[in-house]
Amino acid sequence: MKVKRSNIKVGEKIAQGGYAEIFQCTYQGKEYVLRQLKGDLLFKRKIVNQFLDGIRHRKTSSDNDHIVKFVGYGGNRFIKPFELIERQNKTTLKDIIVQKHRFAVSKPLDLLINCAQGLKHVHDCNLIHLDIKPENYLLSLNPEPGNYLKLTDFDLTIPATTSYLDSVTSGSLMYLPLEHIRRKKVSKATDVYSFGVMAYNLYCYQTPFMKSVDEIADDYQIKYPSGFEERIPQEIRDFIEKCMHKFPEERFINGDSLLDSLLSIQRKLNKEKSTVHGQKEKGS
């Protein structure tokens, strides 16, 4: 839906990303969020085209409860483009991790499954998101089991038919795999790697590497902070390490297989928990 900028009542600026400024706004009496290309980027054709492609990709993948929904758009390559999207909580998964929010402490697997559902849908739409990280998952307005977080920011998203890029994207280097940084190679496995870094971050409250993976490629090992390895279920550690495998062909192939693995882990851990609980009841 094409939207006239003059019909939008723009409110407080709530965030700023690599390409966009983000505002609260009102349109036709309802509250939304306005994502608008930064003014100093308007004459950078490649970035403008990426931003416009991102709007189109969000629209394509918007029919899902785990994606921040597209509402409308305006502008073009010559007039500052923008998109109107559904309003969410300003809190991101990164905020939840940094603050050690009760969701991060008590429901990390539930959060991961929720995030994987969004990624699965993007991959089902034959897209590669290319910017999977905690900052791009927003807490729902009414968080509840199965609907805690929604995926946003499609500025770097590309068709899954793409195998190589002209240059490394401006995504966060800490979340990008070696084949992307060194050879500009991309696939759905690129998102899987980023998801693994995010999962590690959620369980350990830090990223696995303090440097870009390119800088530590010769000594590529996933290690856990002192005391964390024993607290993280082996199944979760195996999951993280498969996502982050150095070689893309050894990772989960896409969001669908990644989600299946998480659901399987959830069933197993719930069964073990139920068994232990039942044994305690018998003992008492």
Image (tube, rainbow, N blue to C red):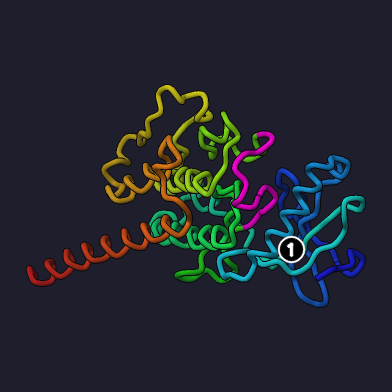
Q: Residue 171 in the image: state x and y as whole percent.
A: 63, 40
Name the residue at the bottom extreme.
29
> From the viewer's perspective, is residue 227 above or below residue 213?
below
Bounds of the magenta span?
A: 152-167
**Residue at figure coordinates x 36%, y 63% from the top left:** 263
Residue on which disc 1 sits: 33
Give neighbour class at mark 1: few <14, some 14-19, many 20+ (Cα, 10 Å): many
Quadrant where the C terminus is found in the figure: bottom left
Using residue 257 as the reference point, say whether residue 232 is left or right of it: left
In the rendered image, residue 210 lying in the magenta stretch gets the answer no
Front residue of this view, candidates 38 and 241 = 241
Q: On screen, 188 above or below 149?
A: above
Residue placed at 55% from the left, 47% from the top?
A: 133
Can residue 236 be seen? yes
Question: Can residue 103 be seen in the rendering of this structure?
Answer: no
Secondary-structure class at tag 1 = strand
Residue 257 % position (x, y):
41, 57
Compared to residue 46, the image places residue 55 above or below, namely below
Magenta stretch, overall SS: loop
| Residue at the (36%, 57%) spot, across then down | 261
- The N terminus lies in quadrant: bottom right
Q: Residue 78's x, y, as percent? A: 92, 50
Question: Which amino acid type is shown beneath numbered disc 1?
Answer: Val
Task: Name the foreground residue: 250 vs 35.
Answer: 250
Task: Examine the structure image and report whether residue 156 is included in the region drawn in magenta.
Answer: yes
User: Percent x, y for residue 99?
Assistant: 50, 49
Horizontal side, residue 66 vs residue 232: left or right: right
